[in-house]
């Protein structure tokens, strides 16, 4: 299923259904895409306007990241669902003989590892975007400061939501198998909170100035 080809109404209905996919990981990737889209909009409203020339560089930097992030979020949304579907399929594999049990166990673990790796990439992309937003809020088009704030909230939710999916999947894997994913996500939740807080302060300061 390609969630990006759905209407927004149909996607929301799919989220609301009792089906396991799309789930939180897919929703996180879609939220990140919205954050990147808003960021690109603010950049477009800044670059080329003499009134906001002090923010052109911040906007150029943010736009490059936003374009890259946006190019990945649809894939990540689809891959997140596909990874979970792979795990479900693995659990349905036969387990009559010892050989079948071993094959099934390995398939479950490989699928679960993938189901942790995809949201980790979502979280990493979200952090890349978040790191550009404080400067954009401070120096970009002041009339769109609130949009930077919304982009930050969406990106922060995407990162933290994706990390939930990382954590729930690595919890069922042998430590040695999940080591790289655990290392890659280490400290990211706290970093996300700190960076997002800085953006929120910058947005509030800009709105009130």
Image: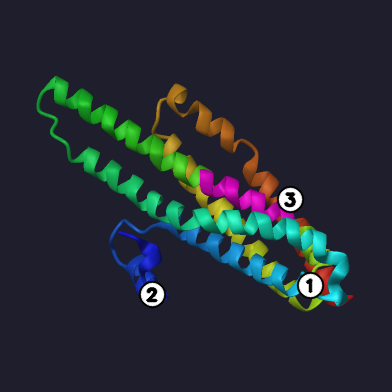
| Residue 21 is one of the magenta-drawn residues | no
Residue at 79% across, 59% down: 58
Could you tell me which secondary element the residue under label 1 belongs to?
A: loop
Where residue 176 sits in the image (x, y, percent)? 46, 22
Q: Quadrant of the C terminus?
A: bottom right
State which tag comes first along the sequence, 3 or 1. 1
Question: Can you say whether 146 is above or below 185 in the image?
Answer: below
**Residue that badge 3 annotates:** 194
State which tag comes first along the sequence, 3 or 2. 2
Count of marks placed on residues: 3
Instruction: Determine if residue 202 is in view.
Output: no
Foreground pick, 37 / 97: 37
Question: Can you say whether 144 is above or below 33 in the image?
Answer: below
Foreground pick, 103 / 189: 103
Residue at 46% across, 29% down: 178
How far apart are the alpha carbons under marks 3 and 2? 34 Å
Q: Quadrant of the N terminus?
A: bottom left
Foreground pick, 32 / 99: 32
Residue at 36% across, 52% down: 81
Magenta segment range?
121-133
How far apart are the alpha carbons under marks 3 and 1? 31 Å
**Residue that badge 2 annotates:** 7
Where residue 8 sits in the image (x, y, percent)? 42, 74
State which tag comes first along the sequence, 2 or 1. 2
**Residue that badge 1 annotates:** 48
Could you tell me which secondary element the residue under label 2 belongs to?
A: loop
């Amino acid at each position: 299923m390609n969630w990006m080809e759905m209407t927004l109404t149909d996607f929301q209905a799919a989220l609301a259904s009792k089906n396991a996919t799309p789930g939180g990981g897919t929703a996180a990737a879609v939220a990140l895409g919205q954050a990147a889209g808003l960021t690109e909009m603010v950049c477009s409203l800044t670059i080329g306007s003499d009134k906001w020339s002090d923010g052109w560089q911040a906007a150029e930097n943010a736009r490059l990241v936003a374009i890259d992030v946006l190019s990945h979020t649809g894939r990540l949304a689809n891959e997140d669902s596909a990874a979970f579907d792979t795990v479900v399929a693995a659990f349905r594999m036969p387990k009559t003989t010892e050989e079948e049990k071993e094959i099934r166990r390995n398939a479950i673990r490989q699928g679960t590892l993938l189901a942790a790796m995809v949201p980790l990439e979502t979280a990493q992309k979200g952090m890349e975007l978040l790191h550009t937003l404080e400067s954009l809020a401070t120096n970009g088009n002041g009339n769109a400061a609130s949009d930077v704030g919304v982009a930050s909230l969406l990106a922060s939710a995407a990162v933290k939501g994706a990390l939930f999916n990382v954590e729930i999947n690595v919890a069922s894997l042998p430590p040695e198998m999940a080591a790289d994913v655990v290392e890659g996500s280490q400290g990211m939740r706290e970093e996300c909170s700190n960076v997002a807080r800085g953006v929120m302060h910058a947005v509030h300061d800009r709105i009130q100035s």
